[in-house]
């Protein structure tokens, strides 16, 4: 059976969960903290952008998907703002881990809501053929975003 969009999306969700587990265990001011934060930021940004384009844009086009996609895009924005806050805090600072925990909490909530609710809503909107072709388009864009982060 061909891969669907949801298989591809869940793969990044698992990567994000595992990165946050490691990130929250890092020590203040270490290289590991900095590197893991960069990796986590890039994973979230590549996933978010490709997911917005290939899951939420098609959902937005259908009345049934309007509320869910709006809600999810709003959460993406809130997550981006928390990432920006965290970037402005020194890795030695006590506030860092507190903000990182807040971000992790927000992301975990978001991923769960997508997996339990929004994927199901979109499942009723997209055809089986679309679920397969959108997976390929999502993967291509996600990989392109990762390459552009690696080059910068
Ligand atoms: Fe998302
Ligand atoms: Fe997602």
Image (spheres, helix red, strand yellow):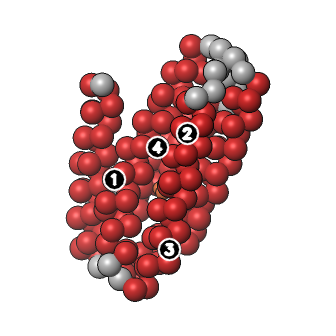
Quarter occupied by residue 152: top left
Mark 1–mark 2 CB contact (< 8 Å): no
Lateral position of residue 103 relative to residue 42, left or right: right
The structure residue drawn at horizontal position 59% and vertical position 43%, both measured from the top left corner, is 82
Circle 2 is placed at which residue position? 83
Cα separation between marks 3 and 1: 17 Å
The structure residue drawn at horizontal position 64% and vertical position 51%, both measured from the top left corner, is 106
Quarter occupied by residue 30: top right
- Say which label, 1 or 4, has the lower sequence index: 4
| Rendered location of residue 57, percent (x, y) | 33, 68
Q: Nearer the viewer, mark 4 or mark 2?
A: 2
| Rendered location of residue 143, percent (x, y) | 28, 41
Quarter occupied by residue 151: top left
Report whether residue 4 is seen: no
Circle 4 is placed at which residue position? 44
The structure residue drawn at horizontal position 56% and vertical position 53%, both measured from the top left corner, is 78
- Quadrant location, the N terminus: bottom left
| Rendered location of residue 93, percent (x, y) | 72, 21
The structure residue drawn at horizontal position 40% and vertical position 48%, both measured from the top left corner, is 47
Lateral position of residue 105 relative to residue 41, left or right: right
Numbered badge on residue 68? 3
Circle 1 is placed at which residue position? 50
Mark 4–mark 2 CB contact (< 8 Å): yes
Rate crowding at label 2 as few (under 14), some (14 to 19) or many (20 or more) other CA atoms within 10 Å.
some
Cα separation between marks 4 and 2: 10 Å
Mark 4–mark 3 CB contact (< 8 Å): no
Query: Is label 4 within 8 A of ligand 1 (CB to nearest ligand atom)?
Result: no
Query: Is label 3 within 8 A of ligand 1 (CB to nearest ligand atom)?
Result: no
Query: Is label 2 within 8 A of ligand 1 (CB to nearest ligand atom)?
Result: no
């Amino acid at each position: 059976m061909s891969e669907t969009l949801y298989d591809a999306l869940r793969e990044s969700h698992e990567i994000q969960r595992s990165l946050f587990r490691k990130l929250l265990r890092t020590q203040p001011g270490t290289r590991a903290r900095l590197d893991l934060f960069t990796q986590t930021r890039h994973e979230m940004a590549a996933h978010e952008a490709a997911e917005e384009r290939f899951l939420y844009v098609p959902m937005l086009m259908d009345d049934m998907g309007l509320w869910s996609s709006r809600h999810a895009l709003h959460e993406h924005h809130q997550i981006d703002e928390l990432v920006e806050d965290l970037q402005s805090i020194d890795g030695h600072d006590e506030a860092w881990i507190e903000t990182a925990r807040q971000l992790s909490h927000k992301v975990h909530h978001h991923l769960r809501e997508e997996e339990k609710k929004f994927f199901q809503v979109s499942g009723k909107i997209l055809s089986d053929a679309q679920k397969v072709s959108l997976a390929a388009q999502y993967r291509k864009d996600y990989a392109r975003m990762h390459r552009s982060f690696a080059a910068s």
